[in-house]
Amino acid sequence: MLLHLLQTFAAHPDLATGQAPAGLLHPFEEAQLAGLRVVKRRREWLLGRWTAKHLVRLYLAQREGQPPPALAAIVIAPDPDGAPYAARALADELARLPLSLSISHSGDRAFCALDDRPGVTIGADIERIEPREPGLVAQFFAPAEQAIVAGAPAGERDGLITAIWSAKEAVLKALRLGLRVDTRQLSCLPMREVAAEGWLRLTVAAEGLPLSTPVRLRGRWRMEDGFVQTLAWAEAHDAVAPDG
Ligand SMILES: CC(C)(COP(=O)(O)OP(=O)(O)OC[C@H]1O[C@@H](n2cnc3c(N)ncnc32)[C@H](O)[C@@H]1OP(=O)(O)O)[C@@H](O)C(=O)NCCC(=O)NCCS
């Protein structure tokens, strides 16, 4: 099952102040929040937790057909590399859920996605469309990406550059690498062809990235309300095709 959710600070008045809404956090997460001093980081972290927990509740309600657990009984925790996972809080332990989860923040919004197919990891990213540093394309984009940017009408360039950058981040999250690698070894080309309802196709190719096992890379993208959203999957070769 693939699910994704976008939320803004309008969802709850406390989120925008950097304070946790009552009933949102588990004590493990309260300790994490206490370690975050910068208000911008507290705000985005909280909105990410808010969005991820609502998404996991939606997933559990659909999968189990029963009322889902309270928000504070779902824990969103980081693995050592920073990638998030979801767990149920039991009396004295966290029981990790068998799904892949990804979180992204930009401006006043957070975008989260999950996928429960075995052998699949998902990456989600959201970026506000705005002019980027002039050197970004030359320094960080693969030759095929530079070529489509050069060939795009001037009025479409900011959107296209944002989409390519967002796609790279989504793929590098799905691969659990983050921006630790040479981003020119990854080529993400946003296409105009429809991939699924509301989503366009993204062609992804990687050459030379440090991957521990061979995976197939897929992606989707869309523009909405001045933001680009991207989804990417790293799939073992025997994984079933994505739904939705
Ligand atoms: C992961 C990364 C691509 C995120 O991109 P970004 O544009 O800065 O931020 P986004 O809002 O889109 O995504 C942030 C989320 O990515 C997730 N994330 C962090 N590291 C990740 C990884 N290795 N793999 C997958 N997801 C990761 C987290 O959930 C994080 O949100 P949270 O900390 O609030 O839970 C980028 O931060 C990165 O490459 N980090 C690794 C490099 C590093 O360690 N930098 C030093 C950080 S102090």
Image (cartoon, helix red, strand yellow):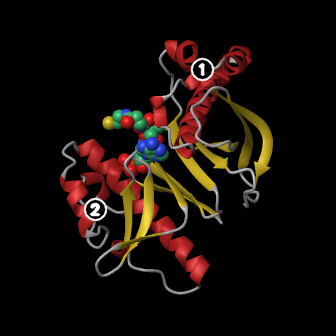
Q: Position of residue 137 (x, y in %)?
A: 57, 17
Q: Are marks 1 and 2 in contact (CB under 8 Å)?
A: no
Q: Which residue is more in the foreground, 204 or 113?
A: 204
Residue at 63% across, 45% down? 232
For numbered disc 2, what is the local secondary structure?
A: helix
What residue is disc 1 on?
A: 141
Q: Which residue is more in the foreground, 134 or 138?
A: 138
Q: What is the crowding at mark 2: few (fewer than 14 residues within 10 Å), some, or many (at least 20)? A: some
What residue is disc 2 on?
A: 29
Q: Earlier in the sequence, mark 1 or mark 2?
A: 2
Give the Cα separation between the discs numbered 1 and 2: 36 Å
Residue 134 makes an appearance in the image: no
User: In this rendering, would 138 be left or right of 237?
Assistant: left
User: In this rendering, would 42 be left or right of 162?
Assistant: left
Q: Position of residue 89 (x, y in %)?
A: 35, 75
* Up-down relation of residue 136 to residue 165 (above or below): above
**What kind of residue is marked 1?**
Phe
Instruction: Name the quadrant containing residue 5.
Output: bottom right
